[in-house]
Amino acid sequence: MNTLKGEKVAVVGLAASGRAAAQLALEKGGKVHVSDLRTDAATHARGAELRALGAEVDLGEHPLDRIADAATIVVSPGIRPDTPVLSELAERGVRWISEPEFAFRFFHGPLIAVTGTNGKTTTAVLLAHLLEEDGLDVALGGNIGAAFGPPASELALREDGPAWYVVEMSSFQLAAIDRFKPDIGVVTNLAPDHLDWYPSVESYYADKANVFRNADDDSCWVLNEGDSAVADLAEGIPGRHFYFGRSSSGRPGAPRGAHCDGDVLTLDLSGAPEPLGHAEDIALLGAHNLENALAASTAAGLAGASPESIRRGLSTAKALPHRTENVAAADGVRWVNDSKATNVAAARSAINSLDGALLVLLGGKDKGEDFSLLVEALSKADARVLAFGQAGPRICKALDGHVPAELLPGGFDEVMEAATHRAVPGTTVLLSPACSSYDMFTSYEERGTRFAELAKASSRDAER
């Protein structure tokens, strides 16, 4: 698909992905209408930019008739499926697509899609790095966040096709796909998440399963061998299935991908194992990042990167901010920022991956998950918990009698002050909140940045 030839395109939502979709539609000759309920200064500025390019823009409303009249309706991932405009479109039998689905229609090159509950961004960024180490031109973007890459529609604006597109896909983006078809698909893991949005875990997993929707015999799938939910989702899906995991035993009868042979990462795509280096050589903190490295290595190998390039890329990879990131250390106390851990599974993974005494900061906006699932990991780590935010009382109730937990009222700065006073030498203070940030912050990035600022200040004071 190279042109829209005057086709009417409606874009619902004017955040980053909506703006990118509108720009792509305009570039391809579409007649574009954009709407957003917000009327703040930033939204007005984006609207003015698109008007100057020829789009029609409505702020403060979603005019249903104008939207329904479009040949293609692109919905931003931040628009809830139960919002009135989508409910009314559904009642009329009108379908819509997600922004990456729209962008995919203008891609010129093979696609690797990365999804899963946790580790998506780390895996996608690392995968792009491994491919670039092999000299390949990579277009990285999607749900990955502005710090690492643009929305998929910006990638589609490239005049020349890259060697590979690498796109991270959220469940919200996969919920509304039609033709989207990765040549290589990566599923990092699955665990309950977004239960403040989805009515059940099953409905969340069903959206994730859409990554397989257009699979055929030429598709390649990179799957977590230790995750039964991933295995169930991929059961019977056409294409070649490759597995990654820390176990050296693998899945009986299944093709290998990347695994650990002792402490050596090993790639085996065709029965000829290739060592990729020692686990300690990877500059990513935590055992869970070892799985991300194995997933990225498998996909890179399938995309044509040489073992030598993958080995070199693993040794030069850098940790991403807000993901088990060492931010400060002094007087025997280490501070680790894992603010991106916005669900129980991610927090549990971080807790399991760190050695030594832990003081874990848990809390934020409650998404309805079962915090008792943290008890085993916290107990094994002999951890103490400081609970805070909207979810703090429910966290303490779930951990009561199993793990030492203290409920801290007040703001985040007060939580950090308490952590400073309670952390003794030999302790790692871990912010892995298992909750979203929206009760105190505008994003997990803002929360993590504040954690890092206060941790560094505490470390400076300790050194005096």
Image: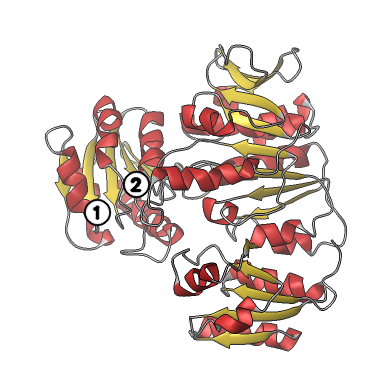
Q: Which residue is denoted by mark 1 in the rendering?
A: 391
Q: Quadrant of the N terminus?
A: bottom right
- Which is more toward the observer, 383 or 205? 205
Q: Is residue 192 left or right of residue 304?
A: left
Q: Position of residue 274 (x, y in %)?
A: 72, 17
Image quadrant where residue 402 sits: top left
| Residue 209 drawn at (x, y percent) | 56, 42
Q: Quadrant of residue 239?
A: top right
Coordinates of residue 208 in the picture (x, y in percent): 54, 45
The amino acid pointed to by label 2 is Ala
Whether residue 231 is situated above or below residue 168 in the rendered picture: above
Q: Farthest front residue?
A: 92
Crowding at mark 1 (Cα within 10 Å: few <14, some 14-19, many 20+)? many
Q: Are marks 1 and 2 in contact (CB under 8 Å)?
A: yes
Between residues 448 and 254, which one lies in front from this camera angle?
Answer: 254
The residue drawn where x is 62% and y is 70% is 18
For the point 28% across and 46% down, the residue is: 361
Left or right side of 445 for 217: right
Q: Which mark is residue 409?
A: none
Q: Along the horizontal axis of the image, is 376 left or right of 61?
A: left
Q: How is the image coloured?
A: secondary structure
Of the image marks 1 and 2, the number of the one nearer the N terminus: 1
Q: Is residue 116 above or below residue 62?
A: above
Residue 121 in the image: x percent, y percent?
A: 57, 46
Q: Residue furthest left?
A: 401
Residue at image mark 2: 434
Instruction: Report the residue at 82% width, 79% height from top.
Output: 6
